[in-house]
Image (cartoon, rainbow, N blue to C red):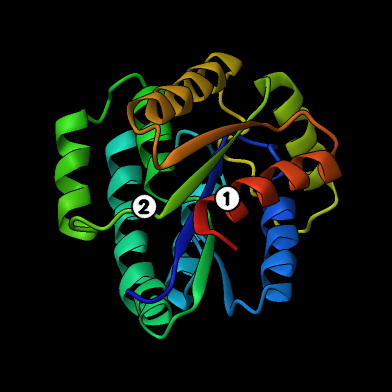
């Protein structure tokens, strides 16, 4: 494909949405045609699935149901938005992709969905496609959760279903992302999300500029 696919990953409150917007503005200055998106919720269908997945009671569905819905959203996201954009040369920046499903539904939920089954779902929904670069923003979960809950306090729709899960889940989640990065070091780069916003942005710009020679 002519375009690039860059994903941002990490636990709650790592500042992904802020950094994606800042990177988008930088890349536009470099004459790149940018599409900003997210999972779940990057398409009209995805917006409906997002309400189901990240609002309401934490126990309203089990890990298998979550995984199936996330991969349904992902396939729809790819075929209706990501791949068409890349085909015409656009750079797609996504707030979350498949690494989040592996981190949350496998590592966070302690294997309630097997790695084998998640791999099978990936094959069905995604095939052999992978992001060109995945930026994992890492932060102590206690700091991240405090940030996320503070942000949610000012929002009409409370997207805090996962924030309401116990802190041990979030530490397993963090370790899951670090393991994913360790297993795929060329695609994944871990950055310190506890840095000031502008400093973290500079790190991301340096990484993307070097990776794609821009």
Q: Residue 66 lies in what quarter of the image?
A: top left
Question: Which numbered disc flags the more N-terminal residue, 2 or 1?
Answer: 2
List x then y, in percent, for residue 14: 68, 37
**Which numbered circle lies on residue 180?**
none
- Residue 30 seen from this side: yes
List x then y, in percent, for residue 70: 36, 52
- Outermost residue to the bottom: 88
Give the residue at mark 2.
70
Q: Nearer the viewer, residue 203 or 96?
A: 203
Q: Residue at x 82, y 39 (%)?
A: 199
Q: Residue at x 35, y 81 (%)?
A: 87
**Which numbered circle lies on residue 210?**
1
- State the CA–CA distance, disc 2 to disc 1: 32 Å
List x then y, in percent, for residue 112: 27, 25
Q: Residue 149 lies in what quarter of the image?
A: top right
- Residue 158 seen from this side: no
- Outermost residue to the front: 213
- Outermost residue to the top: 168
List x then y, in percent, for residue 211: 51, 51
Q: Quadrant of the C terminus?
A: bottom right
What SS does tag 2 mark? helix
């Amino acid at each position: 494909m002519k375009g690039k696919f860059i994903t941002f990953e990490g636990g709650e409150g790592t500042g992904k949405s802020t950094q994606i917007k800042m990177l988008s503005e930088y890349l536009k200055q470099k004459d790149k045609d940018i599409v900003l998106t997210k999972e779940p919720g990057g398409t009209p269908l995805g917006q409906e699935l997002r309400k189901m997945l990240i609002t309401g009671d934490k126990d309203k569905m089990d890990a298998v149901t979550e995984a199936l819905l996330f991969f349904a959203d992902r396939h729809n996201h790819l075929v209706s938005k990501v791949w068409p954009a890349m085909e015409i040369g656009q750079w797609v920046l996504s707030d979350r992709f498949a690494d989040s499903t592996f981190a949350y539904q496998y590592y966070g939920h302690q294997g309630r969905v097997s790695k084998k089954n998640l791999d099978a779902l990936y094959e069905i929904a995604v095939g052999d496609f992978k992001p060109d670069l995945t930026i994992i923003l890492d932060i102590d979960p206690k700091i991240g959760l405090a940030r996320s809950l503070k942000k949610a306090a000012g929002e009409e729709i409370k997207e805090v279903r996962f924030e309401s899960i116990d802190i041990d889940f979030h530490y397993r989640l963090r370790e899951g992302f670090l393991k994913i990065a360790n297993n795929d070091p060329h695609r994944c780069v871990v950055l310190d999300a506890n840095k000031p916003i502008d400093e973290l942005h500079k790190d991301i710009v340096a990484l993307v500029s070097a990776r794609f020679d821009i």
